[in-house]
Image (tube, grey):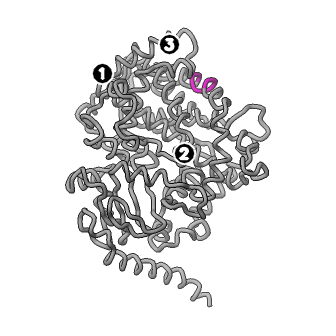
Amino acid sequence: MIYLLLLLPAVVGLCELLRRYLNYLFTPLNRIPGEKTSFLWGSFWELRNERGLAAHFRRWKKVGVDTPLVHYTYLFGTQSVLVTDPDIIKTILLAPSEKVGKKSRFHKESYFLEQALGAGLVALDGVDYMRHRRICQPSFNTGVIRDQVNEVIPHLTKKFVEYWEIAADTGVEIDIMIHLSALSLDSVGFVLFGHDFRGMDSVKGWAEKTKDALMSGQKISDEIGKEAFRFDDPFIAGVMEAHHTNLITIALIVLGLASLDPYINPKRIRTDRVVNEATDNMIENARTSDKYSLLKLLLQAGDPEDEKVKLTQEELRHECKTFLLAGHETTATLVQWTLLACCKHPDVQEKLVEDIRKHWDSTSDLTLDIAEKMEYMQAVINEVLRMYPPVAMIIRVNKEKEILGGYEIPAGTRLGLPMLLVHRHPKFWDKPDEFRPERWLENPEPSHRFAFFPFSAGSRTCIGNRFAVWEAKIMLAGILNAFKVQLAPSQREIVHEFAIDISMKAEPSILVLIKKR
């Protein structure tokens, strides 16, 4: 009997692989333009070895950029379609989410999202998503979050600038992503959780070690930065550990048995326990604190349709994990790409500084009200979101058979909606590969509403999109008002490629020099 129980998952997995193989052989998707790929590996190695969406770019241009759908297969015959037509994207993103069951018409491919971000708003679907959204949305719309942004982020940015002054005019190269991640981590920590993740302690530690090295005449090495940026908060450590999949997880996903992972994978069991304990402590601190934060608001929030329905402790744990990773990653990535654009386009950087100083003389505190008056700042951020969206592609899976772009799409097809490609579609953008913020001053709206969707759209629009942009504006204003930012000499001939993780980072990491203004 025990042996039969052990064999059952393997039998179920093999049946799933057989189903995929038959689907691979006879699917009507073969009539959609694309490239023939194998059942076993599909486009896996191609997509894995080409950074970002380079393989998708190449495939799209090969079949023709006016092609609305591009067919390919992924691992073990998983049927996939790249959607590059804004009208079809509109159909998918605006499909009603109400009156659905566990899965909506175009639902999330959720397992990897749950593994990375928790079973919160980003990964949930159907009625569970709608309930969480109804409970969480009012808390984001209150003035409390805006007040917290004004209180916390200018102060943190001012400290950040003080620490960076150590390296100004010294030739020290700074890896901006790890620094910005620390700054954004504390911003999210205080505003959303009322919790100090001590990210800025890492920036301070880097500054002190850099100062000591400069005074003693030592060579500044990468190790100084890496040693300083080690976060000891148990919640952060546990979440980061859980983010990395192992062979057991991958095998279960391939066999269609991902739901067993939390119960039989020792690593997953261990990290879940650590994260849950740390999250429970954070929730209890928010409950007893007299300071407002998003988490404190969520503890009090009920479903508008039934005020007695609140988030459970387990659901709060998952939302904490989601808001932490999605929140701080998105902002740090957005600021990273904006600073790279400023390095590559010095004229843009100077116009941006002029706009910042037009509205803020730096003798008074920087506030969100001031930052929101910076029109060129908004144009630069929009152009960065167009060319370097923090999320490069979102995935949906259709629950039933669909007719999209005149093609039959069988149920269970993986639909990729690539912001990175559509935001550079020559049909909808003039000189799409040219970084030109002025286009947003000339025409504040894109020619097609769904040719620009950096934060998704419809009922699944990113709940924290305004918070992310608020953060980015204040951080950029503080940094660029104080420093002229240039690419490090070692990177001036390097083409930074897109590396997709939770967000779209740069490969290799962006290194800069800073000079006092």
Can residue 301 be seen? yes
Residue 49 vs residue 114: left or right? left
Where residue 234 appears, as percent x and y from the top left, is 63, 47
Q: Give the magenta-colored segment's residue range.
A: 150-155
Task: State the CA–CA distance, disc 1 to disc 2.
Answer: 31 Å
Query: Under tag 3, what secondary structure?
Result: loop
Residue at 62 percent across and 60 percent down: it is 270
Amino acid carrying mark 1 in the image? Pro
**288 shown above or below 248:** above
Which residue has dot 3 on it?
Answer: 360
Instruction: Check disc 1: other Cα within 10 Å, few if <14, some if 14-19, many if 20+.
Output: some
Asked if the residue under mark 2 is in contact with the one under mark 3, i.e. CB atoms within 8 Å, the reply is no
Task: State the CA–CA distance, disc 1 to disc 3.
Answer: 21 Å
Between marks 1 and 3 in the image, the one whose residue lies nearer the viewer: 3
**5 shown above or below 240:** below
Where residue 17 appears, as percent x and y from the top left, is 41, 77
Can residue 216 be seen? no
Count the marks: 3
Where residue 22 appears, as percent x and y from the top left, is 36, 80
Considering only order in the chain, which callout, 2 or 3, is on the residue closer to the N terminus?
2
Between marks 3 and 2 in the image, the one whose residue lies nearer the viewer: 3
Instruction: Check disc 2: other Cα within 10 Å, few if <14, some if 14-19, many if 20+.
Output: many
Q: Which of these two is toward me, 504 or 72?
A: 72
Task: State the CA–CA distance, disc 3 to disc 2.
Answer: 31 Å
Residue at 39 percent across and 30 percent down: it is 338
Q: Quadrant of the N terminus?
A: bottom right
Residue 306 vs residue 259: left or right? right
Which residue has dot 1 on it?
Answer: 346
